[in-house]
Image (cartoon, grey):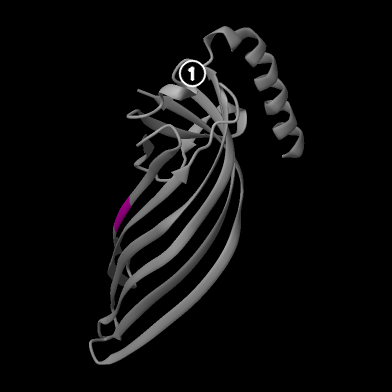
């Protein structure tokens, strides 16, 4: 990983030599939007703050707001018919998360700026599991479970942004995340035995350094 990071930095430095004449004038960022992508291994692009959209808006040259929205959904339906038993298995899960940050972006030079910011991180999730079996020589058995949960936290970030050409920049960013999460699981066995479990969790983590690409418009 370290070697790949050094290689990426070396390539960016070389690329800067050929694109310095196209450097973005960072005094003109006020009122501009930007889409952000994470630069992963082999220079593939992925989500930066959210799986659906990651972007920011500059109020002024030195201040901006950044938003990341993530959504996910899955559904599974399986049926089985064997000589000994038959059954139906259904499951589905949905989640949504939203991250917002207020960013301070002082200008270091014409095409390089340091930035830092903080903001709330919110998440909601729900999942359901339903498994019914019908053994040929026994009565029907069923197991159902549902999980509801949420998370609330704060994300703090700091990094350096480099405008290597007009309306495009690269950044290296580090962050710290504090999150409180809660979940409640309800289980039901054969429609008669029910249990409930609640889980609380606190976490404080340092995020790995990420490389990002921003496209301004």
Q: Residue at x 40, y 59 (%)?
A: 120
Q: Where residue 160 appears, x then y in whole percent?
A: 59, 36
- Rendering quarter of residue 93: bottom left
Q: Is residue 7 above or below residue 166?
A: below
Q: Where residue 24 appears, x then y in whole percent?
A: 49, 17
Q: Is residue 37 left or right of residue 39?
A: left
Q: Nearer the viewer, residue 100 or 38?
A: 100
Residue range of the region highlighted in magenta in the rendering: 72-76
- Rendering quarter of residue 1: top right
Q: Is residue 43 above or below residue 126?
A: above
Q: Circle 1 sits on which residue?
A: 25
Q: Where residue 75 appears, x then y in whole percent?
A: 29, 55
Q: Is residue 206 above or below residue 105?
A: below
Question: What main secondary structure does the magenta stretch of the protein show?
Answer: strand
Q: Is residue 69 above or below residue 198?
A: above
- Rendering quarter of residue 80: bottom left
Q: Nearer the viewer, residue 95 or 102?
A: 102
Q: Residue at x 33, y 51 (%)?
A: 72
Residue at the farthest bottom position: 192
Q: Quadrant of the C terminus?
A: top left
Q: How many marks?
A: 1
Q: Does dot 1 land on a helix, a strand or a loop?
A: loop
Magenta span has 74? yes
Magenta span has 148? no
Q: Where residue 163 appears, x then y in whole percent?
A: 54, 22
Residue at the farthest right position: 3
Q: Residue at x 32, y 68 (%)?
A: 83
Badge 1: residue crowd in 10 Å (few <14, some 14–19, many ≥20)? some
Q: Nearer the viewer, residue 197 or 162?
A: 162
């Amino acid at each position: 990983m370290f070697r790949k990071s050094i290689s990426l930095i070396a390539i960016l430095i070389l690329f800067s030599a050929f694109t310095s004449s196209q450097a973005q004038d960072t005094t003109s960022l006020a009122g501009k939007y930007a889409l952000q992508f994470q630069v992963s291994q082999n220079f593939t692009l992925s989500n930066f703050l959210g799986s659906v959209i990651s972007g920011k808006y500059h109020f002024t040259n030195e201040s901006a707001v950044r938003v990341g929205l993530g959504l996910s959904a899955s559904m599974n339906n399986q049926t089985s018919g064997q000589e000994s038993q038959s059954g139906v298995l259904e499951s589905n899960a949905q989640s949504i998360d939203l991250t917002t940050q207020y960013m301070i972006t002082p200008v270091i030079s014409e095409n390089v700026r340091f930035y830092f910011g903080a903001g709330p991180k919110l998440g909601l999730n729900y999942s359901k599991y339903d498994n019914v079996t019908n053994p040929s020589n026994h009565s029907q058995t069923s197991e159902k479970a549902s999980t509801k949960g949420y998370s609330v936290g704060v994300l703090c970030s700091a990094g350096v942004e480099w405008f290597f050409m007009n309306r495009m920049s690269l950044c290296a960013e580090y962050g710290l995340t504090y999150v409180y999460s809660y979940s409640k699981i309800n289980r039901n066995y054969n429609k008669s035995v029910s249990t409930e479990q609640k889980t609380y969790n606190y976490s404080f983590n340092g995020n790995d350094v990420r490389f990002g690409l921003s496209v301004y418009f």
